[in-house]
Image: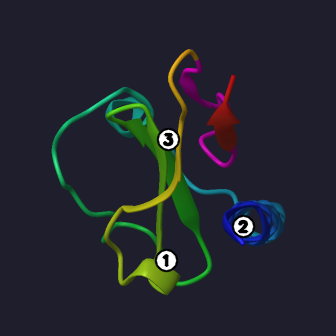
Amino acid sequence: MKMKLIIAVTLLALSAGACKMKGQIDKADLKESSSGGDCKDLDASSARMRCNNNAVEFCSSYSDYKFKETQKCPEGKTCFIAPDGKSGGCK
């Protein structure tokens, strides 16, 4: 279920990016953080991902513009987010 959600969010974000070029990704959202935060700066068809406490989180209109955990990385694996901020996982 979580993998399907990650794939759906990634596809949504990629299709939205193809239709409209948006500003630079906020590098603070790509770094490990312990803050709650939101992503109210996103439009309704955009999404953002980040690592928080070694877990993958996403934020979009689907999550009411709040970061929600989609995958907790098991011990020995590290959360990563792609440079574009639109996909991630554990490796």
Q: Position of residue 84 (x, y in %)?
A: 66, 37
Outermost residue toward the left in this view = 35
Q: Secondary structure at mark 1?
A: loop
* Picture quadrant where residue 52 is located: top left
Sequence-first disc among 2 and 1: 2
Q: Secondary structure at mark 2?
A: loop
Q: Secondary structure at mark 3?
A: loop
Q: Residue at x 75, y 60 (%)?
A: 3
Q: Position of residue 54 (x, y in %)?
A: 42, 31
Q: Which residue is mark 1?
A: 43
Q: Amino acid at mark 2?
A: Lys
Other-residue count near label 2 (Cα within 10 Å), few / some / many at <14 / 14–19 / ≥20: few
| Residue range (magenta) | 77-87
**What secondary structure is the stretch in magenta mostly built from?**
loop
Q: Which residue is mark 2?
A: 20
Quadrant in which the C terminus appears: top right
Q: Amino acid at mark 3?
A: Ile
Residue 39 falls within the magenta-colored stretch: no
Circle count: 3
Other-residue count near label 1 (Cα within 10 Å), few / some / many at <14 / 14–19 / ≥20: few
Closest to the observer, 68 or 27: 68
Q: Which residue is mark 3?
A: 25
